[in-house]
Amino acid sequence: MNNIHKNYWNTHQRSVKEKPHGVARVISKRGFCSRSQAENLVRAGRVSLRGKIVRDPDAPARENDEICVDGKIVKASEFVYFMMNKPRGYVTTASDEKGRATVMDLFREEFAKMFPGKPVPHISPVGRLDAASEGLLLFTNDTKWADTLLKTKDERRQLQKARAATNHVWHGRAAQFVQEHRDCTKTKDAIRSKVTEHAEVPRIGNEPLAFPHTKIYRVQVNGHPTSDDLAKMESGFYVPPRVFGEPEEFMHAVSANLYSAGEKNSWLEITLDEGKNREIRRMLAHLGYEVLRLVRIKFCNYELGDLKQGEIKEIRPSTEQTTV
C-alpha cells in the first residue's frame, strides 16, 4: 500500500515540479543574462548541461540541473525589484541600433550612484513605455513575477479557468484513490494534505502574488475633450491599424476623466487594463486630439509617488491575495 501511495505522488510531483525547459530559458530564469544572450552562448558551445557541452538552446533542462558557462556554474541570482521615473526621450530596450539613449543606460547610471562599486544585476524592464512617454517603469530579474504583471485581464481569466479545471480533475482522481484505499489512514491523510497544497497561484518565494492589472496615466492633450469623447473611450471603438493592411483594433479605457483644464490644453486621467501598442495615443488621435505629454503614474499595485525624473528606487513586491 505504501509503495502505491509513494509511486502515485512521485509521478505527480515530477509532472508538476520537474517539467523541463530549454537550457537557454533556464539560464535566463536564473538571472544570468537575457534569453537571446543565453541562446548565443549555447550555440557558441560555451554552455555545459550536466557536464556535457550542448549547442541546442532548446536542449531540455530542469530547474535544479547543473549548468555551466565557460566552466563556471550558473547559480540563481537573488531577485531584485526596482521602479524608475522614466524621462521622455529614452527607449525601453537593452540596446538600440540607432544609438539612442535607453532606459538600461539610465538604470546603470542610477544604480552606480545608489550602490557604489556593486555590480549591476542582470535586469530588464517590465513591459514598455515608448520614447515619448514618461513615468513609472518597473525592472526585475524575476521573470515569473514580470510575466504575472503583464498578463491581460482575459489571459488571467483563462489561466484561472484552466487552473480550476485542472484542480477539479486532480481532486476527483485523489478522491477516487482515497476511496480505493480507504482502509489506509496514513494514505488518506497524506493525499488530502497534497490536494490542499495543489491549487497553484503565481508566487514570489512562498508568497502568493496579487495584482489587479491596471495602469493609470495622466495625459495632456491639446483642446478640451467633451464628456461624449470620454464616454466613447470608455465604451470603446475600432481604431485604424498602425501598419497598412492590418485589421482595425478594438480599444477601450476602463475610465477616462478630465483631471484639469487650462485655456488651450487639458489633462486627462485614463485607466487601462490591457497593453495594446500606443493605445491611448491612437484612441485620442482617432477622436482628433494630439497627445502633448503622457505620464504613467500607476502600474498594478505600484505608484510613482514623488520619485523624481530619472531616479530609481528599490521596491518590495506585493503579496496580497489575487482577485481575478
Image: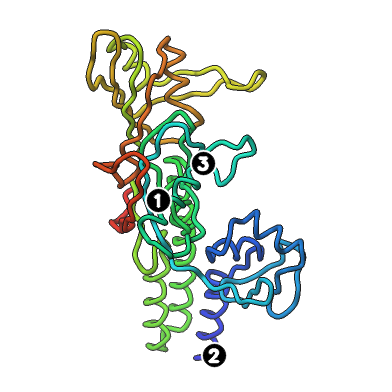
Q: Earlier in the sequence, mark 2 or mark 3?
A: 2
| Residue at (59% x, 56% y) in the render | 34
Q: Element at badge 1? A: helix
Q: Where is residue 19 in the image (x, y as percent from the top left)?
A: 59, 68
What's under tag 1, amino acid-wise?
Answer: Glu
Q: Nearer the viewer, residue 274 or 136?
A: 136
Residue 102 tag number: 3
Give the labeled residue for mark 1.
110
Q: Nearer the viewer, residue 191 or 319?
A: 319
Q: How crowded is mark 3: few (under 14 residues within 10 Å), some or many (20 or more)?
A: some
Q: Earlier in the sequence, mark 2 or mark 1?
A: 2
| Residue at (40% x, 19% y) in the render | 291
Q: Can residue 324 be seen in this view?
A: no
Q: Which of 146 and 38 is in front in this view?
A: 38
| Residue at (66% x, 71% y) in the render | 69
Q: Nearer the viewer, mark 1 or mark 3?
A: 1
What's under tag 3, amino acid-wise?
Answer: Thr
